[in-house]
């Protein structure tokens, strides 16, 4: 029962963070505080100058971030825990065909989905001239990390297994060592959070180990590009150091935005999400409130911080009133998905 509670806590808090941040995405912290009279602690209908607002989303409704996470979770359940590139590609195309959230598809995912639909090679998207080198900005975003939590949730304590599966979900749209390292950091952190005796420190250590393993796996994979840019593990270390030093929510948000960044790039948003999780001491609500209030890519940052916090503390620490609003605004059967993931996780523990 505790395993189910932790898994439900992770996917529900991640999705609630996504929905909370939908009303603030692309805004600055000062704009958010002025509009909502401080940090965002309740769901609001996204204003028209946000991506979710432009798409007509309602208060408490998830964006493409959590909807992809739920599709990935269902794929894992349907395959009995087997994560293959074929199954994941089919899942991504199914999401693109069915989900109303596809209108806000990310900058790395959209051109790849369009290529797959047209029967073109997704690895030839945005190549430079007549070469096979893709532009540097292609595939360095946080799309893989924002949805990866279910991969870790079905592998409690198995950081290596979580990372190997996370690599698969980075293909074909997030095929850079930055995106892979970031996704592995989150998957490993979530996997560690489910273990007995886990705490904030052990989850952070797992994130660092996952980032390092992801970078190593990326270097050996024929489909993953090595691109210039910051190392995810180094950024996580810096983000955690800033979080430990901060005294207030406003201070930690300012420090992380100034020194790490809060954009859609994986090297910014993923370490920042981990830093906010640390500052909140793993509290689910406080993690997503900070993520939704830090500005810029708020929905993704809150979702990733929420996935870690929910897995560590469990659904028993999720505010029921906020969850009720979220649950009513969305059609995903969150409890059923959590049960399916928990069954796979339990089988692996018993094996």
Image (spheres, grey):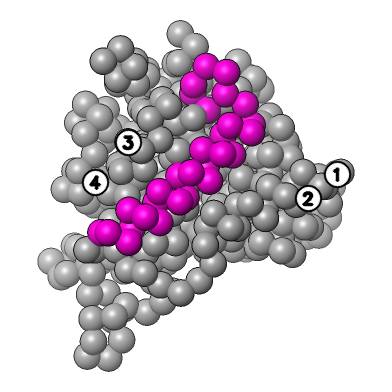
Q: Residue at x 57, y 18 (%)?
A: 197
Q: Is residue 196 magenta?
A: yes
Disc 3 from disc 4: Cα separation:
16 Å
Q: Residue at x 32, y 36 (%)?
A: 161
Question: Farthest bottom residue?
Answer: 129
Give the mark nearer the N terminus: 3 vs 1: 3
Secondary structure found at label 4 = helix
Q: Nearer the viewer, mark 4 or mark 2?
A: 2
Q: Label 2, on which residue?
A: 252
Q: Residue at x 23, y 69 (%)?
A: 123
User: In terms of depth relative to the viewer, which is nearer, 247 or 329?
Assistant: 247
Disc 3 from disc 2: Cα separation:
33 Å
Disc 4 from disc 2: Cα separation:
36 Å
Q: Label 4, on which residue?
A: 88
Q: Label 3, on which residue?
A: 161
Secondary structure found at label 3 = helix
- Residue 146 point in image, percent of width and height: 47, 48
Q: Nearer the viewer, mark 3 or mark 2?
A: 3
Disc 4 from disc 1: Cα separation:
40 Å
């Amino acid at each position: 029962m505790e395993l189910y509670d932790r898994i439900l806590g992770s996917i529900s808090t991640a999705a609630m963070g996504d929905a909370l941040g939908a009303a603030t995405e692309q805004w600055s912290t000062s704009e958010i505080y002025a509009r909502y009279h401080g940090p965002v602690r309740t769901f609001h209908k996204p204003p028209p100058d946000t991506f979710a607002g432009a798409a007509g989303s309602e208060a408490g409704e998830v964006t493409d971030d959590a909807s992809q996470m739920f599709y990935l979770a269902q794929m894992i359940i349907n395959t009995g825990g087997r994560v293959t590139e074929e199954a994941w590609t089919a899942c991504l195309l199914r999401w693109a065909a069915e989900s109303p959230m596809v209108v806000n598809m990310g900058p790395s995912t959209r051109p790849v989905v369009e290529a797959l639909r047209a029967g073109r090679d997704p690895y030839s998207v945005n190549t430079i001239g007549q070469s096979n080198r893709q532009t540097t900005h292609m595939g360095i975003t946080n799309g893989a990390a924002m949805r990866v939590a279910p991969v870790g949730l079905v592998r409690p304590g198995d950081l290596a297994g979580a990372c190997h599966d996370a690599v698969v979900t980075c293909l074909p749209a997030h095929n850079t060592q930055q995106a892979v390292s970031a996704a592995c950091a989150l998957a490993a952190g979530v996997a560690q959070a489910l273990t007995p005796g886990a705490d904030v420190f052990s989850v952070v250590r797992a994130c660092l180990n996952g980032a390092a393993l992801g970078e190593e796996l990326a270097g050996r994979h024929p489909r993953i590009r090595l691109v210039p840019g910051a190392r995810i593990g180094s950024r996580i270390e810096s983000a955690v150091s800033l979080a430990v030093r901060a005294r207030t929510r406003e201070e930690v948000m300012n420090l992380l935005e100034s020194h790490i960044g809060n954009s859609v790039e994986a090297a910014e948003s993923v370490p920042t999400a981990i830093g906010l999780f640390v500052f909140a001491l793993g509290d689910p609500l406080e993690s997503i409130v900070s993520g939704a209030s830090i500005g810029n890519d708020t929905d993704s940052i809150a979702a990733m911080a929420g996935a870690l916090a929910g897995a560590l503390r469990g659904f028993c620490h999720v505010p029921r009133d906020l969850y009720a609003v979220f649950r009513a605004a969305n059609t995903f059967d969150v409890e059923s998905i959590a049960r399916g993931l928990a069954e796979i996780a339990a089988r692996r523990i018993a094996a």
